[in-house]
Structures are given as C-alpha cells and as structure tokens.
Image (cartoon, grey):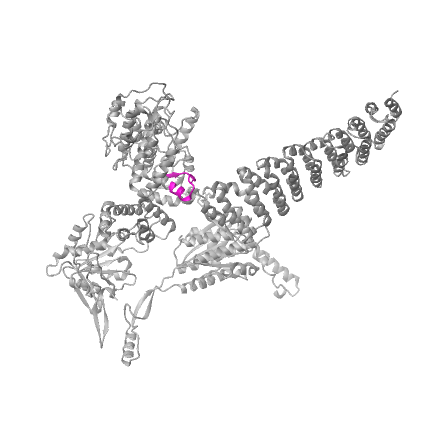
Amino acid sequence: MTAAEQLRERYAAELRGFGSSLPEDFGAAAAELAPRFSAQQLELWAQAGVALANYSLRSWEASAEYFRASPQVASAMRFEQLMAWARIATELAERSSVVSAAFLKATPEVLEHLPPWQLEPWARQGERLCRGNWKSIALCALYFSSSPRLLAAMSLQRLGELVAVVDALTERSYELATTCVEHAPQIFGALAPRDHEPFLRFAQAVTRVSWADTRLYLERGPALLERVEPEMRSRFLELAARVTADVGRQGFPLFAGAAAALGEIELSQHDAMLAFAGRLAIASPIAAMEYLKSAPFVRTRLTAEQMQQWAESGASVLLEDGNAEGAEAFFRLESTRAEQLMTALTARVELAHVGSTLRLYAKALTGEQVSVRSTEELVERGIGWVTESSATTEGTAIYLPPFISTFEHQDANFQAYKVFATHQAGRMEFGSFRYRFGDDGTQTPSTVHERERRVRGDAPTRATTAMERYFDLFPDRALIAALFTVIEDTRVDAYVGREYGGIRSVLRRLQAHEAQHRPALQGMALRAAFVENLLRASLQAADTMQWPHALEPVLRDGLSALRMVELAEATVQDSAEVAAALYDIAQRIPNVELEPDEQWETPDGDLLEVAASMPGGGAGDVPMPQGEEAEFETPPQPEFRGDFKPELVQLLMQLRQQREGDGEGEGAGSPITQQQLQELLEKSVELSLSGMEEGDIASSLAMFLSGLEKEGGTPQGEPRPEHGQQQGSGEEPVQQDLPVAIEWFHYDEWDFRAADYRPRWCRVGERVAPEGSLDFYQETLQRHHGLVAETRRQFELLRPETFRKIKRLEDGEDLDLDHAIEFLVDKRAGVGPQARIYWRRNKIERDVAVAFLLDMSASTDEEIEKQRPRRNEREDGFDDDPRKYFQWLAQRRAKQAQEPPKRIIDLEKESAVLIVEALEAIGDAYGIYGFSGYGRENVEFYTIKNLDEHFSDRVRKRIAKIDPVRSTRMGPAIRHTVHKLEGFEAKVKILILVSDGRPQDHGYGRDRTEKEYAVHDTKQALLEAKRAGITPFLITVDKEGHDYLGEMCDDIGYEVVADIESLPRRLPSLYRTLATQ
Amino acid sequence: MASTTRRTTASEQAPGKGAGFRSLQVEEFRIKSEPYYLPIADEVELFQTAYAQHMPVLLKGPTGCGKTRFLEYMSWRLHQHVPTRAEEGVPLITVACHEDLTASDLVGRYLLEREETRWIDGPLTRAVKVGAICYLDEIVEARKDTTVLIHPLTDYRRLLPVEKRGELLEAADGFLLVVSYNPGYQSALKDLKHSTRQRFVAIEFDYPPRELEAEIVQREADCSAEVARQLAKLGEKVRNLKEHGLAEGVSTRLLIYAGKLIANGIQSRRACQTAVVWALTDDAEVQRSIEEVVTSIFED
C-alpha cells in the first residue's frame, strides 16, 4: 500500500459525511503529492484539509477546493509555503467558507502571476472586502475568482488600490462595487500599465465625492482616455484627480468633458495644453478643465499660437488679478473679454459679425432692397439651391457662406467676403438676370431668333422666362449653362474691376487663389477642358491654360470670344451671344479623353493677348480627335463667384411679380401654371439633381415646387375672419386662436465675480400682454375716484404753458416799454445800464418719456393682509366681550368673501391705472411693461402699453390682465426697457421699476440661496440705464428692501413704500419729483 | 437782428482783391459774374417764366443739391427784367430761417437812436421795396406765425403789411418770393402748412445723375475727371442707402468738398472718409458700410 493509499484509508472515515466527492478529491491529491512530500508532511497537509472541512457546516466545499488545488499549488512552492496557504484558507473560512473556497480555487491560476510569497498580501487585500454580510461575502468571493484575470491586467499593488475603491463603494452600493470588480479586468487590460496608478487615484477621488460617478468613470474612462496622447494620459488623470479633490462632484463631468475635448485636438498639442492646464489648476482647477473643454471650439477659430495668446490672457485674469471666477467664466467662454479677444485674434470672419455691414454695402451698390443671409438659410428654403458652401443670389438676397477662413489674416478674409458680396451684387447691378430674349447686345447682334427658327421651326415657345427660352435653344443644357456661367461671370468680374477700382487688387488676389486650386487639365475630357481653359482665362490666369497644340485655333476662337464680354459696354445680351457662339465651337470638340502621351501645351504669349472678336469659323476645319464620348462635366465654380442660376432667378422674379400683381413686363398677364413650373424645373440643370435616385428627384422636385410656390405666393384662400367678429355671441372671443408673437432679444449679464459680462446670456421674449376685461379699469376708477381726481389735478399743474414771455433780453420780438424807459433813464443818469429792453416769447416744451416696469413675479400673488401687522384688536373696543369680537370677525369674513383680499399685484395694477390717468392728463409719453420668466433663456417681457402706443381700451384690458407669473430676473428686463427708451426721442427719460422684492431667478446666482449675483447684475443694469441718460428709480414694497437696495442702488434713487397700500398714492407724486428734476 | 446772409460764390472771390472787407446794404448786393450752374432739366426756363408772371417759387429738394446755387444763377441771369437798373442782375436777399425767426426779423423794427426811435426795414421789406428776389431758405424751420406773414405777398395782391407803422407796401415789379424746403428732412415733425404751400409753384430738385454730377464735381472741385467720376459714383451708391440707415443721401456739396481735398493732395479714401462718411452719419455700422463702398471705388 502506498503512502497515499494509507493516508486515504486513514481519513476515509473522517471525510465521510461531507460531499460525496470529497474523499475522491482527497485521494487524487494525496496520490499526486505523495512522491513529493514526506509522510509527516503529507500528514500535516491532510490534517489541514480535514480541519478545514470540519470548520463549519459548508466548509467542506472549501476543503474540496483545497484538495483539488493542492497538487498544482504544491508544485509552485515549498512545503512551508503550502502550509501557510492552508492557514490563510482556514482563516478565511472563519469569515466564510465561500470566500475561502474562492480563494483556494483561484490560487493555481493566480500563481501564474504572483510569486508564492505574495499570496498572503493578495489574500489580505481581498479579506478587507469581507464584512460578514452575504453581499460582502459574494463580493469578496468575486474578488478571488476574478483575481487571475485582474492580475493578468494589473499588478498586485494596483489591485490593492482597486480594492480600496471598491471597498469605498460598498458603503453605498454593493451592486455597483460588484460591477466594478467584474469590469475591472477588461478596463485595466485596455489601459497601459503606467496609467493604472493615476487612473485608480482619480477613481478614488471620484468615489470619495460622487460614488455614483465611479461606474460611469470605469465604464467610459478608458474610451475617453484612448484619444488622449498616450504619454499624457497619466498627467491628465493626475490633473483630474487634483481637480476632483477640489471641486467635488463636478470632477467627473469636467474630466469627461475635457477628455472628449482633448480627443478633438491633434495629439501633438496635448503636451502643451496639459502643461498650461496644470499651471491654471494650481489656482483654479475648474478653470483648467474649462480651458481644456473649450479648446476644440477655440481651435476652430484660432491657430495654435493664437490660442496660446488667448489662453495667456485668461491665465492673467487668474494668476495676476487673482480672479478665479473671472478666469473660469473666461475659459468657459462666458465672458465678453474672452469673446472679444477671440474675435480680435481670429483670422476667421463670421457672417454674423459682418453681415449688417455687407447688407448696407450691397444695398448701396445695387440700390435695391437686398438682404444678406447665410447660405444655410437658402438651402432650407427649398427653392432649388442645395449646396450650403457657395455664395449666390436669388435676385432679392445675397447669400454668403457663414464664415470665411481661407486666408491667414482677418482683414484678408473680410476682403474676400467683400469680393463675394460685390460679385453677387454685381450680378444684380450689371443685369445678369435682366436677359431679354432677342435684344441686341452692345457688341453683338442677336441671333437667337434665327437659332430658334432652326431649332423649333414655327412651333411657338412654351418657355416661361426669357432665360428658359434661351436655354431651350441648345440641346446640351449642361454645356450652355456652363458656358453662359463662365461668360457672364467674366463680364461681371470685368465690370467690377472697372467700376470698383478699390477692390480690383483683392479681386485679382482671389482670382489667383482660385486659379491655383483648379482641377488638373490633363486627363480631362476635351470639351470639359475647353470650358475649364476659358474659366482659367476668365480668372486672369491664362498662363495656367493647357491645351493640345493641334487644336490651338479652336481655343484661340474661344478666347477671343470671351474677351468680347470684357469690353466696357458689354451687356448680358452679349454674354448670351458669346455663349451661343462658344457653344457652337464646343459642340464640335468631342468630349473624349486623349491618350496620355498627347501633347498638351501652355499657350504662348500670342494667344494670351488675343484681341476680342466673335469667332469667324476659321477654326472649323481643324481635325478633331476621335474617341469615346464622355459625359460633359461642368468644371467647379470658383468660390468667390458662387452659384449662378439665372433661369431660377428669372422664374422667381416672375413669380414675385405675379404675386404683387405687377401687370408690367413681358410674360405678365399669363400666370405661370404649375405644369410650366414643373417642366422648367425638370429641364433646368440648375437644380443640381445629378447623382440622385429617381425617387429622390421626384420628391426634391416636389419640394422645390412647393418652395417656389411659397415664394411666388400661392393664391391665398379665404381671408381669415377678423378676430372677435366671427361669432355672433361676440362676448367671448376664442383666445387660443391668437398666436402670441414673441420677439426675442439677447442681453449680456454682469458676472460680478468675473467682473465681466457674460455675452448674450439672457434671452428676453417681448410680447404683447394678454387682454382681460374692461371692468377692472372702470371699477378702479370708480373706487378711487377721489384719488384719481386729485392726481389728475396735480399733474395738470405740471402741464407746461406753451409760451412764456421772457423779458430783459438784448434782442427780442419787441421793445418792452417799461424796461426801455428805465434804460433811458439810467443812461441819462450815467449809471452804465445794459440795453436789455426786449422781450420774446419762448416755447418751453415738456419732453418726458417714462417707462414703468412692473414686477409680475409669483411672489406678487401674496396677500397684503398677511403682511400687515394684526390690528390692535383690543383697542377696537371689544371690551373683552366675545360677542363683539365675533361680530367683528363675521363682518370681516363677509367682507372678504365679497371682495377677495388684495394682493401686491392688485396694488401694482391699481397704481398703473392711476398713473395712466395722470399721465394722459399731462401728455407725457409713457410705456408700461411687465416682466417675469424662468431661467436666463426665457425672460418674459410683457408690453402693456408701448411708449409710442396710443392709450386705448386694449391697454385698459391689458392692465386688467396683469397677473403674477414666475421669477424676477430684473437685469435683462431693465436692459430691455433701456433699449426701448433709447429708441425713443425725449429730453428726459425715466425708468421706474416697481417690485415686491429682491431679484431672484433660476440660475441667477451660484445657487438658490445666493442673492449677491442677482443684486449685482441688477445694479449693473441700472448703471447702464444711467449711462444711457435715463433716470432709473426703484420702488419696492419689500420691507427688507433697505438691506439690499442700498447696495443695489448706490446713487440711484429708490424708495421703500412702507405702507403698501399707499403705493397708488405715492407713485404719482414720485413721478412728479422725478420728471421735473 | 435780422438774419440776412450775404452769399458769396467761388467765382466771386477773385484772387488779389485784398483782405479788406466791404460792407453794403443787402439790396445793393449783386452777383457780378456768372455762377456755375449746370441745368439738369427745364428748371431755368420754369423759373424765368414764373418770375415774369410774379409767381412765387418753392424750391424743393434735398440738402446740398444746388438750390441756392440755382437761385444765385437765376439772380445773375435775370438782369433784363429790371431795365431801370444799371447794374446787372436782380438783387438777391437771402434769409436763413430758424426757429426764433420772428415777424419783426423779416419786416423791420424800431430802434432807439438818441432821443428818438428809428425804424429799420427788415430784409423782406427791403426786397419788396427794391424789387429783389427774397429767398427764405429752409422755410419750415421758421415759426408758423411768421410764415403766415408772407401770405398777402404771395398772391395777386403782392402786398406787405407793416403793422407797426400802419403801412401797406406794394411790391416793386422785380420782387419775387422764393422759399426752399427739404421734404425729407424732419418731415414728420415739421411740415409746411398747406395754406402756405399752395401759394407757390414748386420746382423739384434732386441730385444730378451720375454723369452730370461728375461734370459738376470736376468743375467745382477742380479735380481730375476720373476722380470726379468716382465721386459721382460714390454719391450714387451712398444715396442708395437713404432710408436704410441714412436720413439723407450725400450732397453734391460734400462730394465737391471731397473732390477739393483730393485735388489738393489728400489721399482719396481719407478725403472721402472726412468729407463723406463722417459728415453723413454717426452710426458706426453705417459708417463702416459706406467706408467699404469707398474702399471699393477708390484704390488708395
């Protein structure tokens, strides 16, 4: 019997009663171990296993794992180590047999990654996770079972750090902790080993402040990091950890944003950027991350060096001025300074910035009502233009690309814009769209009628526009369109060059730029090459032409014809003629690709200076090469010339004329039918439908058709009945039918921490206030008739006398006899009198405009009764008689039921009524506005009465409808009112803000409780008003108003109306003082 | 005091006349040499006929389009209508109207002199007496009660009541009342009363077409034909902006100023900036746009 068998015999009894497989596992292991260990050792080994099995009810499972793993484990270590291992297992079993089993089972594989002496630390790390409850046991077991894979991906030390993270997570969610462990092998497998440590350190930081983000981080982190320069990842993670330690739960979102942003930046920049961010992080970690986040956007505007310059300026806000909030706003691009600097640095010119300049410019040039818009809009209109990139015009507007960044300098890019605009304006100014069929040009007689006879015989034309009729003459519409475009553009360029000497040089520069970016000529099909050569010649780059030597006479004919339209008086009629002549030439050129060895030459000087003349047909006998015809492809348009669609423009012009009922002009009188439209669109090559599927073409056509009809104005259906007239009942017009027209305005907001404006931060939506019933106004008048009469009288006293006699003047309307005599007497007496003896009537005009801005925030809904201290009931003489008291109470309740308790808003409304009455008496211009809203994007601004609006029943009704709405974002409301006052002409301008409390709104400050931000912004807005020559005045009914108003108003007038009910009385007298200052 | 203005023309200021000034009565002032005026349409003929028929004339048109120059030219040209006078031309008395212009400013007033008062005729009275053309420039600026004063002078009566003296003056044969009026300017606030307005025949002026304006600019500014042509082009383009940011188009006068600056060595873009762009508007946006037009037209 072997030692193993003996052993098995011996323990068979002890092992019975556990799992059925246990004795077998024991036997198998003993058999393998026997040759290696002494009998004594074997004994110890077996005892350890048996002890484990006996340890607890289910510990036999661990024991089984022990026996199963033993042979492999033993082969990797000395016996003492094996026993140590067994001891660890036993200790683990004390906590949980499951954990112990997992430990034992994983050991053989773990040993592939760890030396035997590290088994203990490995086990201890895991043990930390085990807290006795079943969730922790499962997690701990997972740790051991995942260990082989984990250790394949990371070192033991890192694993320990991971455990720390996981351990921290367990305090929140075991589920989350479990997921972390499950995913960890994958995550760390994907990361470079040197990044493990920073990755984990950041994980710890995230877990500490925002445990829920840990999962996100573990899930997304590796992918996010992947796009960061590998060398820089650890640095970035360290930065992120530092930031998180500082900012708490914002840490991960900032990291994610910054990482995504870095991913969009070329890798070579990462080093410098992270170094810079590191510098910022010392003073403001947030600024550092915001810097990274903004980088991709900034990089679209600035070069790397410019961005460096821009960022340095932000850094100086932080490091020199010590203004962290300012720097954060700067890098978040929420500061005017940041934007202005970027605009100043960038070479890129945005249409949004120069659009209005260009609009006036184009208006000046064309003398027409042109607008300048972005090409993006044109595509949306769906009238036949599909490319967003190139400039164009459709006859009433000039469309320009949203930005130009072709050149290195801002000025050059702006000049390019100007050339774009000039060319499009030139098409209008020099009549590109005024082609008339059959008119002679100044250089060429018309041949189109002849051509038409040849093509159509006597059949009448079905064409809608002159341009369409012209294009109908040519079977290859793509070719004639390409030729006509080149020719007409050449003519317009020539005109621009002659008429606008100032931009000639810029035009030449752009032409040269375009000439350098033309497609290669060699290899082009011959006819296309012919057109391309003409185009190059028209770009004044004839020296870049290339053409087969043998066919030179053909090109010569083409060039001399092209030169015709460069003559001073050439018109669009000439362009059409020249294009027709060139069409004849081009038609003879086969569109074949020549053999590569064919001789293409750059024409010599003689050809470059060819004189303008119409082709005489001399080149007709040049032998043409033979070959397979390729389809004609129009050469790409130079950028500054953009799309040219004369056919569509003429159509649009005609549609518009038709809509306006303009009976003049050709083709009028016969309205364009839908069929005609469809035909035109189908024929036209201007729709660039090539490459579309059949179905797409049909749907695009349909879209364009409806777009065009919209442009032309479809016959309007029944005019909608006027609101309010529709029903006989009349009393209750259907309110919801009226769409509320909201006009949006953007205003900056003052960030006092950053000491800078946040550009276009608030969006104010101005709308006309809804109307209520007339009753309120009348009732108020009746209720306060005494007060009304009194204020009216007071205001009437203010009314200026139209003329006042001014006396004692040196010169005037007439002599003032009294003074004249006095003067004579004085003179005789020799007392040196002054000859001020005339009088004159002087007009004194009262010229006051006042805007009332009413707070319509929800808090104005409060009842006034509550605010008022309880009445001195004792003194009311109840004499401790409960009956009297109840009597009083009942009376009061009855009264309340009759008229509901007054709210602050009611008082505001009543005041409005009074002031309106008074101001109507005095004749000052006044406006009444209300404001409320929620959040910066939605500041609601209600027009109850505009400054220039006449007082009417509608205004009365609107006053009735003033209702509490939402928050109080005062700043933008004040700014908008200032904007309104600025647009109004008056010598004295006053803004009176009536509010119930301090400014407050969502996001109007760092958090809900912060009030400083709002107060500062409001103050800034009031100062802006002052700067604009407006006298602002604040009236509040908030008793605590003095606290913040003092700060908010500085030297701006304000008043806290102590007794709220005196507001209606107080307003008029306040107004008097203000307006007569 | 009466706001009488003595208008001089470029042609009158002959060089070498010395720095001394001359003082003369308004009615004695004559335009000695032919002022430069380029007729655009039939305005000369119209005016001549109106003058012969004693019909008061209203000159309508934007500022700086040549209304005053036209009148100077006509005053010079109309000499044959006053056969009794030895001097050439009809005297031209110009009154620039303003808000405080009173009736006495036009008719006359008493002044104290030593122990007594002395009557002094106002410019209108003088014109009525000597048979001059009385030109009330920018009539809308004057107060409405002042403008009523001229009513009896403008119809068949041709009378000027001088209330303070209890006199009634019958206008001399050569007398003609001419007023000017710029309809675009502040039209909403100030408009001519219909009762006033319908007493005049109106001759409408506008800026000359490009070619003629180029001729005028060249002649007046003494600049090259090319510069004049460019300036006229600029004028046309800028006038396209009227009502779109500009209250008034650029006047021929301003174009001439620009031309003079250029002719005297100022860079053309700079000259246009000072004489046209900045003179026209304070709106930075519009300024920028006009400057872009300038830089498109002028090379340096």
Q: Which residues are magenta?
A: A396-417
Inspect this view and state whether residue A478 appears: no
The answer to whether A2 appears left or right of B246 in the picture is right
> Viewer-proximal residue, A741 or A982?
A982
* Residue A645 x/y as whole percent: 35, 32
- Is A656 magenta? The answer is no
Task: Examine the rendered structure and indicate whether residue A682 appears above or below residue B49.
Answer: above
> Viewer-proximal residue, A605 or B263?
A605
* Residue A337 x/y as whole percent: 49, 50
- Is A410 magenta? The answer is yes
Number of labelled discs?
0
Task: Examine the rendered structure and indicate whether residue A57 appears above or below residue A724.
Answer: above
The answer to whether A702 appears left or right of B89 in the picture is right
- Which quadrant of the figure contains the N terminus of chain A? top right
The answer to whether B59 appears left or right of A168 in the picture is left
> Viewer-proximal residue, B24 or A243?
A243
* Residue A974 x/y as whole percent: 48, 54
Q: Residue furthest left?
A: B84
Task: Examine the rendered structure and indicate whether residue B71 appears above or below residue A631.
Answer: below
Inspect this view and state whether residue A116 appears: yes
* Residue A1023 x/y as whole percent: 48, 57
Task: Examine the rendered structure and indicate whether residue A847 appears above or below residue A574.
Answer: below
Which image quadrant is residue A947 in? bottom left
- Which quadrant of the figure contains the C terminus of chain A? bottom left
Q: Residue furthest bottom?
A: A829
